[in-house]
Image: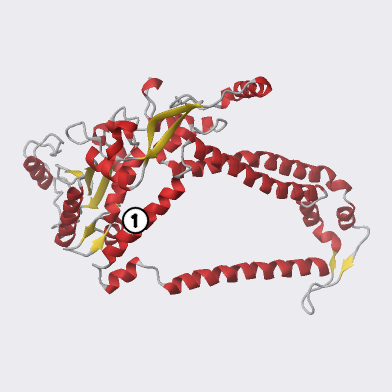
């Protein structure tokens, strides 16, 4: 089996995070297949008795000869896909992306095309996508005084052991205003360095937007990287992590991935709060909000699970005093029950379901009613608590104006898509648009599913009442 291209990149040195010059960062990677001849699998030994092993520092011709001598001959290239890749990469270069190819002959079955987005393209796309960037304008939150200040200080000291060991990006009482990026107003933004202004998540998002809208009109009439992945022109497309996740000895020089691995994606840190600011920086706002919701949901499940265990223990302690269970399990009463069916079934003893009755009482006892009432209140509390938490994160991350920006961006995308659809034929338009019949099927299938659940609930209720 062919190895996973992402797994191969994990085994490469950290120098592969940059171009050959060691300065330009690799923002995205395109992977395509490079098949070997299946008739030659053995390594041939040269005259000196050694197996030729090509190195990265060798020239392309030397490596090709060594690979051919070792029996790793390549299949003839797939010319249609090669032409599509050439056109697609030429279009990417016209968009402003910088591309670097592998200089070696393919040894790992896959070949990698590395992409870098320069500052000119970053600034242009950030302005088009309305990406919000911190400005120089800041304001200080009012410090709590009096009784609320004492309670806040006391609560902070209690929660100190549960805080993740990651550096805070700024003063917790300082809020930074952010605005959509504009190349005409660079003096208003807090730009310490052009390389660090946009996070890796934003850089990957910008490259993906370029890949998504780049079209191949001369070779295959295909638009976007998703279509090329479906056609098999490329096998995978993904951004890179910040190096290896194994922590270094010096904790002050850890990258974001190492800090997330130690303080978040680790069983030893399950009792700590999530580093939400670092998650947002590394994965973006959408993934950050998802894990924030997951954290709130998990925290509020603690009292619900504790009460559920208490209800189960109550059933274990009171199962011997339950009158219906005692009557079912008492063999001296000798209750004979009617057959469950008309002809085949026979009479049966009520004591035969003793173990089933005792087991059902463990989960369905008198305390279950109170647990059901608690869970109904818990659902309302969870919803309101998450709304509050979501608003706090939106205010802290300055996402309150994102909805208006998304509406403007969707309108612009619709105009661009309408212009692109004019150049496509009827078949390609049908692939890009969702048929109305599919929408009807999805809509009515949901209604039928809900009705089936209602009928099933009614049937179970009737059986419970008449048995």
Residue lying furthest bottom in this view? 343
Quarter of the figure that contains the C terminus: bottom right
Residue lying furthest right in this view? 333
- Residue 452 location, quadrant: bottom right
Side of 138 where 111 appears, left or right: left
Side of 137 where 100 appears, left or right: left
Q: What's the residue at 6%, 42% (across, down)?
A: 61
In what element is the residue under mark 1?
helix
Query: Number of marks in the image?
Result: 1
- Residue 46 location, quadrant: top left
Q: Residue 221 or 18: which is nearer the viewer?
A: 221
In the rendering, at what x and y percent does residue 451 appear? 63, 70
Q: Which residue is mark 1?
A: 412
Q: Is residue 95 placed above or below 243 in the rendered structure?
A: below
Residue 178 visible, this angle: yes
Q: What's the residue at 88%, 53% (across, down)?
A: 326
Q: Residue 17 or 34: which is nearer the viewer?
A: 17
Q: What's the residue at 88%, 55% (across, down)?
A: 324
In the rendering, at what x and y percent does residue 203 appear? 31, 41
Side of 347 where 13 appears, left or right: left
Side of 243 where 453 appears, left or right: right
Residue 37 visible, this angle: no
């Amino acid at each position: 089996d062919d190895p996973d291209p992402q797994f191969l990149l994990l085994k490469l040195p950290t120098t592969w995070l940059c171009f050959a010059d060691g300065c330009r960062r690799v923002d995205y990677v395109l992977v395509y297949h490079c098949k070997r001849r299946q008739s030659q699998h053995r390594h041939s030994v040269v005259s000196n008795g050694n197996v030729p092993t090509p190195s990265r520092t060798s020239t392309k011709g030397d490596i090709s000869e060594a690979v051919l001598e070792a029996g790793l001959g390549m299949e003839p290239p797939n010319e249609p896909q090669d032409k599509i890749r050439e056109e697609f990469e030429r279009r990417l270069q016209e968009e402003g992306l910088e591309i670097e190819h592998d200089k070696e002959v393919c040894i790992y079955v896959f070949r990698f095309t590395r992409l870098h987005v320069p500052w000119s393209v970053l600034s242009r796309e950030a302005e088009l996508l309305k990406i919000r960037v911190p400005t120089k304008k800041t304001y200080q939150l009012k410090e709590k005084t009096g009784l609320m200040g004492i309670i806040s200080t006391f609560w902070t000291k209690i929660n100190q052991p549960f805080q993740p060991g990651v550096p805070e990006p700024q003063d917790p009482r300082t809020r930074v205003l952010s605005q959509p990026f504009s190349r005409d107003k660079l003096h208003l933004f807090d730009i310490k360095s052009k390389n660090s202004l946009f996070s890796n998540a934003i850089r990957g998002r910008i490259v993906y937007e370029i890949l998504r809208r780049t079209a191949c009109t001369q070779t295959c009439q295909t638009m976007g990287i998703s279509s090329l992945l479906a056609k098999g022109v490329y096998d995978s497309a993904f951004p890179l992590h910040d190096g290896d996740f194994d922590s270094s000895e010096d904790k002050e020089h850890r990258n974001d991935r190492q800090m997330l691995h130690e303080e978040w994606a680790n069983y030893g840190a399950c009792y700590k709060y999530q580093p939400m600011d670092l998650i947002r920086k590394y994965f973006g706002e959408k993934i950050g909000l998802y894990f924030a919701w997951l954290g709130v949901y998990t925290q509020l499940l603690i009292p619900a699970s504790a009460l559920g265990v208490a209800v189960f223990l109550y059933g274990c302690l009171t199962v011997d005093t339950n009158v219906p269970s005692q009557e079912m399990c008492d063999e001296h009463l000798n209750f004979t029950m009617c057959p469950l069916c008309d002809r085949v079934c026979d009479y049966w003893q009520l004591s035969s379901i003793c173990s089933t009755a005792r087991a059902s009482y463990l989960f369905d006892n008198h305390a279950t009613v109170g647990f059901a009432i608690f869970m109904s209140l818990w659902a309302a509390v969870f919803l309101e608590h998450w709304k509050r938490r979501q608003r706090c994160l939106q205010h802290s991350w300055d996402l309150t104006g994102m909805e208006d920006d998304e509406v403007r961006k969707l309108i612009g995308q619709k105009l661009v898509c309408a212009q692109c659809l004019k150049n496509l034929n009827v078949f390609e338009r049908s692939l890009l648009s969702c048929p109305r019949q599919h929408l009807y099927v999805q809509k009515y299938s949901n209604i039928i599913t809900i009705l089936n659940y209602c009928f099933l609930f009614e049937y179970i209720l009737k059986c419970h009442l008449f048995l």
